[in-house]
């Protein structure tokens, strides 16, 4: 398995789910919609939540204090993505334990910290080309690109106030807003999907922490203008009603 230099990150969880990410990044999946086991064990995540409550609860005591699966509505519970990252990291480590098979490995597994920049066919095999110029071959390749960094608008690189990828630049964004001295600030977020929502919430948190900023406006834009879907297992015969981002409120804001 090839993964770019981890630099303190865990493997099982993608970048938006790392412990270093903002606590305000919330899942758009309810807790009973999440499971690395799929339909075979649909409650896998909820079982993990109960078992590991002391661990994740140490990071989010305000959530853990009222978290009781016997009393809450799982279909209406959306947790910080950091907690799901811990779950994914545990799932990865469990896979490694199963591969090790008590010291009798089922097969050879390697984690190589390199950034794959290209994949080509050569003599019936896949040739992997790494960012450092080295190469490797494989009989087949699975692309698990995850959340990739934006490669557009390279001409804006280094421009004050421009950040190409907030998941990798949270500290820089926090510092920029903390040092902002004007009473008004406007920000444009390119993208309205999950990363766009995360970035907007992140900016909102940072701006509110700066007493110098008295007013602000955050604008999200994208080619499609589509917001992320909130995924909840439906109850038989029931339909969901949007409370905030519904037709009436959207029309009133246009």
Image (cartoon, helix red, strand yellow):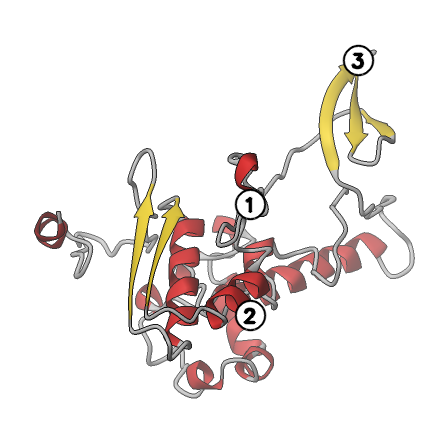
Q: Residue furthest top?
A: 123
Residue at image point 17% right, 52% down: 237
Quickly name the residue at label 2.
48
Residue at image point 86% right, 29% down: 136
Q: Nearer the viewer, mark 2 or mark 1?
A: 1
Quickly name the residue at label 1.
147
**Disc 1, SS:** loop
Q: Is residue 62 above or below residue 251?
A: below
Who is closer to the viewer here, 191 or 52? 191
Q: Earlier in the sequence, mark 3 or mark 2?
A: 2
User: How many labels sit on residues?
Assistant: 3
- Work out which quarter of the rendered image holds the N terminus and state it: top right
Provide residue 14's location: percent of width, then percent of height. Answer: 60, 53
**Residue 26 appears in the figure:** no
Q: Earlier in the sequence, mark 3 or mark 1?
A: 3
The reply, left or right, for residue 40 in relation to residue 199 is right
Quickly name the residue at label 3.
124
Q: Earlier in the sequence, mark 2 or mark 1?
A: 2
Q: Rounded to the nearest whole Å, what is the CA distance between mark 3 and mark 1?
A: 29 Å
**Disc 3, SS:** loop
Q: Is residue 125 above or below residue 4?
A: above
**Residue 177 appears in the figure:** yes
């Amino acid at each position: 398995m090839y993964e770019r230099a981890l630099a303190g990150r865990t493997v099982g969880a993608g970048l938006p789910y790392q412990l270093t990410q903002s606590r305000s990044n919330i899942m758009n999946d309810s807790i009973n919609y999440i499971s690395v086991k799929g339909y075979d064990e649909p409650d896998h995540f909820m079982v993990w939540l109960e078992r590991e409550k002391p661990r994740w609860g140490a990071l989010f005591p305000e959530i853990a204090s009222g978290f009781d699966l016997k009393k809450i509505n799982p279909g209406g519970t959306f947790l910080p993505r950091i907690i799901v990252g811990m779950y994914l990291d545990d799932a990865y480590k469990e896979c490694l334990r199963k591969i090790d098979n008590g010291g009798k490995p089922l097969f050879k597994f390697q984690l190589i910290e390199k950034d794959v920049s290209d994949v080509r066919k050569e003599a019936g095999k896949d040739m992997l080309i790494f960012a450092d110029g080295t190469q490797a071959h494989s009989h087949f390749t699975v692309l698990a690109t995850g959340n990739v960094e934006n490669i557009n608008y390279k001409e804006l690189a280094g421009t004050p106030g421009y950040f190409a990828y907030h998941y990798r630049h949270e500290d820089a964004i926090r510092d920029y807003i903390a040092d902002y001295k004007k009473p008004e600030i406007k920000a444009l977020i390119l993208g309205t999907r999950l990363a766009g929502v995360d970035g907007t919430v992140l900016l909102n948190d940072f701006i509110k922490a700066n007493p110098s900023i008295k007013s602000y406006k955050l604008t999200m834009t994208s080619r499609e203008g589509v917001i992320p879907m909130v995924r909840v297992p439906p109850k038989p015969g029931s339909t969901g009603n949007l409370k905030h981002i519904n037709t009436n409120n959207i029309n009133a804001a246009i």
